[in-house]
Amino acid sequence: MSTEGYYEDLTSDEADFILDIYRVIDRLVYDGRAVTLVALGYELGVNPQELSDYLPTILIILNKVEEQYEIR
């Protein structure tokens, strides 16, 4: 499946939630803590099962954040 030219409409609430996920992942990686759905759910105040819809996004963010810290 090619993602080129693929766009998904996001509401501002969804976009804000993804930014919150990014901030939490960044903090967890910076602190050397494990990035798990349980940890994300706790930090975000949501049930970890609710994060399963965001799993592909979470993995992309995690890979980029880890890559960013390896470069530094």
Image: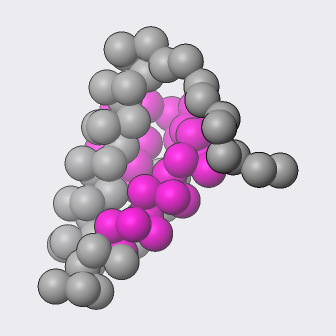
Q: Is the magenta region chiefly helix, strand or loop? A: helix
Region in magenta: 39-66
Residue at (69% x, 46% y) in the render: 3
On screen, residue 46 above or below 70: above
Count the marks.
0
Q: Can residue 25 be seen?
A: yes
Q: Residue at x 36, y 14 (%)?
A: 12
Q: Kindly identify the residue that appears in the image at 39 percent across and 36 percent down.
A: 18
Do we see residue 33 in this rendering? Answer: no
Quadrant position of residue 14: top left
Asked if residue 28 is positioned above or below residue 72 in the image, the reply reads above
Judge whether 51 appears above or below 70 on screen.
above
Residue 35 location, quadrant: bottom left
Q: Quadrant of the C terminus?
A: bottom left
Residue 47 sits inside the magenta stretch? yes
Apparent side of residue 14 relative to residue 9 in the rendered image (left or right): left
Residue closest to the eye, 45 or 17:
17
Out of 44 and 11, give the one closest to the viewer.
11
Q: Looking at the image, which residue sits at the far right? A: 1
- Of the pair 26 and 50, the residue shown nearer to us: 26
Give the percent coordinates (x, y) of residue 41.
Answer: 43, 42
State the image coordinates of residue 46 (x, y, percent, origin top left). Answer: 43, 31
Residue at the extreme front = 5
Q: Position of residue 10 (x, y in %)?
A: 49, 19
Its colouring scheme is one colour
Indicate whether residue 14 is drawn in magenta.
Answer: no
Camera-side residue of 71 and 38: 71
Q: Position of residue 50 (x, y in %)?
A: 58, 32
Q: In the figure, is residue 18 to the left or right of 56?
A: left
